[in-house]
Amino acid sequence: MNTDLDASLAIKRSHDEGHATPSREELIARAEGLRDLLWAGAADSDRNRRLNDTTVAALNEAGITRLFTPRRFGGYEADNLTMLEVTMALARGDSSAAWVTGIGTAAAYMVGLLPEQAQADVWGDNPGARMSAVLAPTAKTVPVDGGYEVTGRWGYMSGCLHADWAWISFPAPDIRGLAIAVVPLKDLTIEDTWFVTGMRGTGSNTLVSDKLFVPSHRVTPLVATTEGYPANVEAIRSEKQSLYRSSFMGVFLLSLVGVVIGEVQAARDIVIEKAPSRGVTTSKYFKQSESVAFQLDLADGSAKIETAATLARDLAREIDDFARRDDYPDDQQRGAHRLKCALALKLAHEAMEIFISAHGSSAFVESNPLSRLWRNVSVAARHAGFSYRISEEVYGRLALDLDPRTVSDIL
């Protein structure tokens, strides 16, 4: 380790010793305290296809971007349950802000898997560095002295409009499978391609590079990392940084499933609030709240969304428990985690459809916030990571002692 890096870490450790790390309850309270502000800006973010500046500033000020920054760099090094609860709380105000937060938090976890020099590059001057990430391997690579020269395009890069760093993936001839690397956002070009129906505020545009140099210390093999052997595994174990022993796919799925759950909870609140003042067309009910059919729909949707939340929380606790024991889950366990998360998402999506139908067709009037919530959930629920059928297939093959990697390299 060089002298400059030693000095930088000494300063960060001194900073950490003088500042208490906020508890899970405090971090959740901070997120909940932003709900009204996020709600007020959500329509603008949706219309402008990017988070508004007030929202970004509020997230920074609340320290939300430090959730998975190591303590020695001035971060909170929280756990997965905290991340889940924070994103759920944020989503009840603005799911795009929550989604960008979830992606950025998972990306910060990935930086924690890299060697110390890479972590100092990212957090040395900015403990709250904002990050984006996408794992689609749409690039060409040439090995060069000290690293790689990468030319490519990466779409659906959520949060890139406000990020400092971005995670990209690319094929590397000296690495089994794909390599993933963190690079400065300023070294990439953003193409405005995010024209979608929902989750518009995430600004998930396309990043482009042309012969970008990526130093080796900012690179880790994707497959080995998902299997529990990232570039920095020995240092993580020796320093007992349990967060960074969390399962890779588990962190990524948890970083997003809470967003959908929180937004469906927000929709449920609106449907309940409006029920006493809305009738049921083609019936004699002048109040939805007096209709048995509406009551049954409300119960059905509520059971689904609360079950989804319970599944997600139980999964977060399970992943955290594995990490604290330095017991990286095996293929069978990771396949089960993936299926549980996909099921939680499926239930949340089904609950949203029930609530919207119970409210009625006015939910689709553009001025009704339910229309935005429905669009957002409809898009988020179709993220490739939540494919219920693929998750079932992976789990089923594992249960039958068949190779799941004929379906997916990432478990």
Image (cartoon, rainbow, N blue to C red):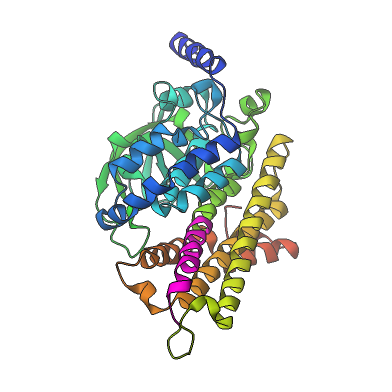
Q: Tell me if 40 is positioned left or right of 179 in this view.
A: left
Residue 134 lies, with reference to residue 374, above or below; the image says above
- In terms of depth relative to the viewer, which is nearer, 395 or 159? 159
Question: Residue 94 in magenta?
Answer: no
- In terms of depth relative to the viewer, which is nearer, 164 or 291? 291
- Give the main secondary structure of the magenta stretch: helix
**Observer able to see residue 37:** yes
Q: Position of residue 242 (x, y in %)?
A: 65, 32
- In terms of depth relative to the viewer, which is nearer, 362 or 392? 362
Q: Position of residue 133 (x, y in %)?
A: 42, 45
What residue is rendered at 32% in x and 63% in y?
A: 196
What residue is rendered at 60% in x and 48% in y?
A: 250
Residue 296 lies, with reference to residue 383, above or below; the image says below
**Observer able to see residue 224:** no
Q: Position of residue 287 (x, y in %)?
A: 48, 78
What residue is rendered at 69% in x and 57% in y?
A: 336
Question: Residue 262 in magenta?
Answer: yes
- In terms of depth relative to the viewer, which is nearer, 258 or 226? 258
Residue 239 lies, with reference to residue 189, above or below; the image says above
Q: Quadrant of residue 380?
A: bottom left
What residue is rendered at 74% in x and 35% in y?
A: 325
Q: Quadrant of residue 25?
A: top right
Q: Which residues are magenta?
A: 261-279
